[in-house]
Image (cartoon, helix red, strand yellow):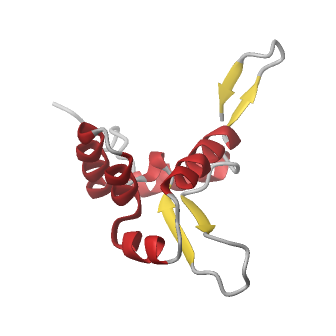
Amino acid sequence: MTDNKKRKVRSLKAVKAKYLESHPKIREWIEFTIDDEPDAKEFRIHAPIFQTNEEKKAFAKAQESDDQFDLAKALLGAQWDDFIEAGGQISLLFLLLDDAADEVHETDSEGNPTTL
């Protein structure tokens, strides 16, 4: 029989907070605008590591279609129509994701890639 006093129960919320604190370069949200205008609408998507279950399901389903429009719609969710109306380009959205991924990679002393 397990002694509940000895068993450590961990909070997923606390795990997430600790991860974000110990990895300051990794952010929960990727925030962006279409252009540099002062009144530009701001969009945001979860960094892949922090996607919700619903976001992960939508993205996995979109990957099956192998269609970049479906992938972008899955990433943006309810923001999709505003993104298109503002002149958003999906190729630039994926370039942004690549750039965000590069921010969390560094190299060790021998030049090998590492992930923060």
Looking at the picture, how far across and down is residue 20, in whole percent? Answer: 60, 52
Residue visible at 36% across and 50% down in the picture: 71
Question: Which residue is outermost to the left?
Answer: 1
Quarter of the image with the N terminus is top left
Question: Which residue is outermost to the bottom?
Answer: 39
Residue visible at 26% across and 52% down in the picture: 58
Q: Is residue 109 left or right of residue 28?
A: right
Question: Which residue is outermost to the right?
Answer: 109
* Image label count: 0
> In this rendering, does residue 28 appear at all?
yes
Give residue 4's quadrant in the image.
top left
Looking at the picture, how far across and down is residue 91, in whole percent? Answer: 53, 50
Looking at the picture, how far across and down is residue 29, in whole percent? Answer: 54, 61
Q: Is residue 21 left or right of residue 71?
A: right
Camera-nearest residue between 111 and 75: 75
Camera-nearest residue between 30 and 74: 74
Quarter of the image with the C terminus is top right
Residue visible at 33% across and 39% down in the picture: 7
Residue visible at 61% across and 41% down in the picture: 101
Camera-nearest residue between 86 and 25: 86
> In this rendering, does residue 4 appear at all?
no
Looking at the picture, how far across and down is residue 69, in whole percent? Answer: 36, 53
Q: Is residue 57 above or below residue 106?
A: below
Q: Is residue 78 left or right of residue 115?
A: left
